[in-house]
Amino acid sequence: MSDLRVAIAGATGAVGAEFLRLLELRNYPIRELRLLASARSAGRTLRFRGEPHPVEELGPDSFRDIDHAFFSAGGGISKTLAPAAAAAGAVVIDNSSAFRYDDDVPLVIPEINPHAAARHRGIIANPNCTTIVALMAVAPLHRRFGVERAVMSSYQAISGAGAQAMQELEDQVRAWTAGEKPQVEHQPHQIAFNLIPRIDAVQENFYTKEEMKFLWEGQKILEHPDLRATATCVRVPVFRSHAVSLNLELRDPASRDAALETLRGAPGVIVEDDPAADIYPTPLALAMRDEVSVGRVRVDPSVAEGRGLALWVVGDQLAKGAALNAVQIGELLARG
């Protein structure tokens, strides 16, 4: 891979910080790094590979001579500036939902549909974090057994709501333990010691947009337009890692052993499954890990002829659910 000129739009946010960590950790081939953020954050200095890098104000002229532009500055910014970055010659890897449902924009998880990236026209969409975590387990099972219907319940870390929400959780815990009243600013209710069963906007069908993303994105990434799926998405007082409970109805019967064998052979997936010995994935253990972990795999007795599986999947929202997946897309492009 030749050295690249790289920009990060949204460099001062939680995902931006994760981009910096992973680009350095994975020795991404960078010869020039441009850090971009809002006018409010411009002038700050962030460190990368031991050197200070100034944060510049993000604008339409920020992408001249850039090869790869990682966007994590919100859907509105992406809609406005990603086309300008692509027109300037950069390949945009966008972490927002702005382009995910555009037929001309690939929606890519490198372990699942790397071929889709080659069809890009200057913009590649990074899937929703919960979709990534879930599909890392669903995809290999679908390839072997055929997934016809998926039911997902998610337990989503506060990192998915951004750096301010993460700080609010910490502040609320400190206030609670000090006997003070926790303050609520960035979530609709107190998140410390609580669950919030609504993420993103409520749609006309009373599902939230976050819940519908699992269906919309699952169909596109798996290239499976007949997939039936439903989800309930819940925000939980966990800092970084999302967990999902999946119930899958299959075309072909699957034993527990066959499912475990399939998952063990899937790239980017680890299996931790011995519940009697308390071996299963937990959000704390998966924080800052690259892999998605699967456990509690069992045949669903409510589905006839062994055509149902239940499983538990955990992955780091900021890493594989966001920045890592985007960086892997960039690595895919760099390899040609």
Image (cartoon, helix red, strand yellow):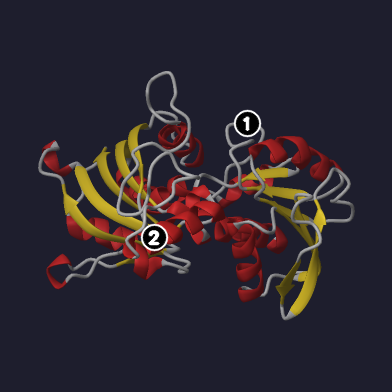
Going by the numbered disc 1, the residue's amino acid type is: Asp
Residue 175 is labelled as 2
The residues tagged by marks 2 and 1 sit, at their Cα atoms, a distance apart of 44 Å
**Residue at horizontal 34%, vertical 46%?**
154
Residue at image mark 1: 102
Residue 191 in sight in this render: yes
Residue 156: x, y in percent?
A: 39, 50
Furthest toward the front, the residue is: 180
Looking at this view, is 26 or 233 the one in front? 233
Total count of labels: 2
Classify the position of the C terminus by image quarter.
Answer: bottom right
Q: Residue 30 falls in which quadrant of the image? A: bottom right
Going by the numbered disc 2, the residue's amino acid type is: Ala
Residue 275: x, y in percent?
A: 16, 66
Residue 4 in sight in this render: no
265 in relation to 300, above or below: below
Mark 2 or mark 1: whose residue is earlier in sequence? 1
Q: What SS does tag 2 mark? A: helix
Residue 187 shown left or right of residue 145 in the figure? right
